[in-house]
Image (tube, rainbow, N blue to C red):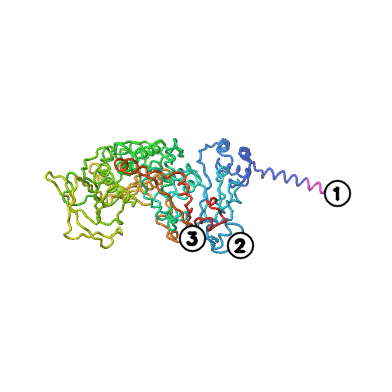
């Protein structure tokens, strides 16, 4: 019995063995030996940062073609090269990336309800979007911290996520779990190409800035003493820090929430401070540039729009060449803004920094005469930016305005900047109320003349910067308001000797929102003048577009501006883009700078992807619900004041720079006035929020 049972069991075992042997022959799957080789090349961290279950899973994904040689976020380039060698692949170096939090929540955000659910941001967001009032703000429960496999994120005392750049491997796990999208993995190219989105952390100042500069970030960097970081933040949007620090009229400050408490933060004076700090440091801070693409782009016009476009194209790895009609680069920055506001040495230093990045420049060459789009194509240029400015002055449309002794405002300032200043005599009349009129008037004061500025509206309707109006008056410019020119009076030689003007009254508002000036019959009066400057407007000179009388393929407007898509700045010709004054008409320097970057972005996408993406969430207007006026919990603090470098005769008898940068101690105090606003949130003072010390809120 026992023997028979043993024989049966033996027989069953023998049969099973035979079956398994046959099955192994039929079902055997040979493992690709490269999987083991790739796994051996990986660091063995098994961190899961790559998104696969350990290094074995990552190796299998590489061999199957589901992942590339750079799958390991820990090993870096060296590991990628080893894996590529096993797989017979080549490795293209990828620019460094970093997780970047950009949030508006934490304890600053008001609670809309009490949340007592699961301690996870995703769970909280499922309940009415979360308890924080800021719709794009951090919920503060730290889900990103829990999933980071490299311990690169921690929640700070402000209950907001902070990333340690030394530990971050840009694996993206934090991005995947954040339900509010307040963390992004960004590289240099992504940061440079990003346009403001309505779901970004956009306080009013960032919304209003035509250059889209991350103002709260650089102000905070100033407060922390990180001046190089502040410069780098600004240069992600604006290469002309020194220029804008001197001449920008600061539209951002007009919507600063601090202005609802006392005075706006001195945003521009802080930009001036860090820009001057770099210039006087004896060195230039490094400007990261992407790997060369070999794509050539022609930038026609070397003013602020062209300089900005060339700067960002170079940072994106392309090879821009600036072609400028004037003897030197700078456009109206050089030839339209006097030395006392923007010293040429300062402008030269800033421009040289752009050229040193590898930007080529050709000066003294005129578009439509010395070269054309077609001739540039034969040189290998693939895309073109037209930033030719607005150099033609508007006329007064009065009798005898073409007589000797009468000159347009732009023409006068350009002539003076080129060292060919006309003889202005002892009495000068400047007609106009904009910044060009102010610059012309203050220049003539420095040339020794008595200056009267004639403007057809009242003082408060003047489009010039209020500071420029006040400064001109301090220097001796006399104002004649509600006066419009009617005729240039000539002497026996046909030269201007005076200006006839007519008294005006303000009527109903016109299209600009200002009250329309209405003539007072019979009020004509003559003011004597040896020289008259007509600074009443500028417009582009687009004659260069009509080469040899041919029809221009670009669409233009009745104001002689070029028509383009406002989101991409692409014209009717696919490879031609535009921006600056030739697109908008006369506008701010920072508007031209912003257009240069937007055009560079579009050119980059056209050259690399063949299409130009524009998000539906692109911010184009101010976001109304962020513009509230009630700002409780903030104490009154005095704003810093810009110092004057010269006074009296030294100021009005020379072209020495008038305003200086604020000292460091004032810059630190001024930066501390910033409320670090988000869409809705802002920092209260310590007394209003004692749980979070002001020096620990970011």
Along the line of sight, which residue is nearer the eye, 625 or 92?
A: 625
Looking at marks 2 and 3 on the same chain, the residue that comes earlier in the sequence is marked by 2
Q: CA distance from mark 3 to mark 1?
A: 96 Å
Nearer to me, 191 or 670:
670
Residue depicted at 70% across the width and 44% down the height = 22
Tag 1 secondary structure: helix
- Number of the label disc, if any, that sits on residue 632: 3
Q: Position of residue 17 (x, y in %)?
A: 75, 45
Q: Tell us which disc is closer to us: 2 or 1.
A: 2
* Quadrant of the rendered image containing residue 299: top left
Q: Can residue 206 be seen at all in this image of the molecule?
A: no
Q: Is residue 13 left or right of residue 613?
A: right
Q: Secondary structure at mark 3?
A: loop
Of discs 2 and 3, which sits in the foreground? 3
Q: Which residue is mark 1?
A: 4
**Residue position marked by numbered label 2 in the rendering:** 116
Q: Secondary structure at mark 2?
A: loop
Is label 3 in contact with label 1 (beta carbons under 8 Å)? no
């Amino acid at each position: 019995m026992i023997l028979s049972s043993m024989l049966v069991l033996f027989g069953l075992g023998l049969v099973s063995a035979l079956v398994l042997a046959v099955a192994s022959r039929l079902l055997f799957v040979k493992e690709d030996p490269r999987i083991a080789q790739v796994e051996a090349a990986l660091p063995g961290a098994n961190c899961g940062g790559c998104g696969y279950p350990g290094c074995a899973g990552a190796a299998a994904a590489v061999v199957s073609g589901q992942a590339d040689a750079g799958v390991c976020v820990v090993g870096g380039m060296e590991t990628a090269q080893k894996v590529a060698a096993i797989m017979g692949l080549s490795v293209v170096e990828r620019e460094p990336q970093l997780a970047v939090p950009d949030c508006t929540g934490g304890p600053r955000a008001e609670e809309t309800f009490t949340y007592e659910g699961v301690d996870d941001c995703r769970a909280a967001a499922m309940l009415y979007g979360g308890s924080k009032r800021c719709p794009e703000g951090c919920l503060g429960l730290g889900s990103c911290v829990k999933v980071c496999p490299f311990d690169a994120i921690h929640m700070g005392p402000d209950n907001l996520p902070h990333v340690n750049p030394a530990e971050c491997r840009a694996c993206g796990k934090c991005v995947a779990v954040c339900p509010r999208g307040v963390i992004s993995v960004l590289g240099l190219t992504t940061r440079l190409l990003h346009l403001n989105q309505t779901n970004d952390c956009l306080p009013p100042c960032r919304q209003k800035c035509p250059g889209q500069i991350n103002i709260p970030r650089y102000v905070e960097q100033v407060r922390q003493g990180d001046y190089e970081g502040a410069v780098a933040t600004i240069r992600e949007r604006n290469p002309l820090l020194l220029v804008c620090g001197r001449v920008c009229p600061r539209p951002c400050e007009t919507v600063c929430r601090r202005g609802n408490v006392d005075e706006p933060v001195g945003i521009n004076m802080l930009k001036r401070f860090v820009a001057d700090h770099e210039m006087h440091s004896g060195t230039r801070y490094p400007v990261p540039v992407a790997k060369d693409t070999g794509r050539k782009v022609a930038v026609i016009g070397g003013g602020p729009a062209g300089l900005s476009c060339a700067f960002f194209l170079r940072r994106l790895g392309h090879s821009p060449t600036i072609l400028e009609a004037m003897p030197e680069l700078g456009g109206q920055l050089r030839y339209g803004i006097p030395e006392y506001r923007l010293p040429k040495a300062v402008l030269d230093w800033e421009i040289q920094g752009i050229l040193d990045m590898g930007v080529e420049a050709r000066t003294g060459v005129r578009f439509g005469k010395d070269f054309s789009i077609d001739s540039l194509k034969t040189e290998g240029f693939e895309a073109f930016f037209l930033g030719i400015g607005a150099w033609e002055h508007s006329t007064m449309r009065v009798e005898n305005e073409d007589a000797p002794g009468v000159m347009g405002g732009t023409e006068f300032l350009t002539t003076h900047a080129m060292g060919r200043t006309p003889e202005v005599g002892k009495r000068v009349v400047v007609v106009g109320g904009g910044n060009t009129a102010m610059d012309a008037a203050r220049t003539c004061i420095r040339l020794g003349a008595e200056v009267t500025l004639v403007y057809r509206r009242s003082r408060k309707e003047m489009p010039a910067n209020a500071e420029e109006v006040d400064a001109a008056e301090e220097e001796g410019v006399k104002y004649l308001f509600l006066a419009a020119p009617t005729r240039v009076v000539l002497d026996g030689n046909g030269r201007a000797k005076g200006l006839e003007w007519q008294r005006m009254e303000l009527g109903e508002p016109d299209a600009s929102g200002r009250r329309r000036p209405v003539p007072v019959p019979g009020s004509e009066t003559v003011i004597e003048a040896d020289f008259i400057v007509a600074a009443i407007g500028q417009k582009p000179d687009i004659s260069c577009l009509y080469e040899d009388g041919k029809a221009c393929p670009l669409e233009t407007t009745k104001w002689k501006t070029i028509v383009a898509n406002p989101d991409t700045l692409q014209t009717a010709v696919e490879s031609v883009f535009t921006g600056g004054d030739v697109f908008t008409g006369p506008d701010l320097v920072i508007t031209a700078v912003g257009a240069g970057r937007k055009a560079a972005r579009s050119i980059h996408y056209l050259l690399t992807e063949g299409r130009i993406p524009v998000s539906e969430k692109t911010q184009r207007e101010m976001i109304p619900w962020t513009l509230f006026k009630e700002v409780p919990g903030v104490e009154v603090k005095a704003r810093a004041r810009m110092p004057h470098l010269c006074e009296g005769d030294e100021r009005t008898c020379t072209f020495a720079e008038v305003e200086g940068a604020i000292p460091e101690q004032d810059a630190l105090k001024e930066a501390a006035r910033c409320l670090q606003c988000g869409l809705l949130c802002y920092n209260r003072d310590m007394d209003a929020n004692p749980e979070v010390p002001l020096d620990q809120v970011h």
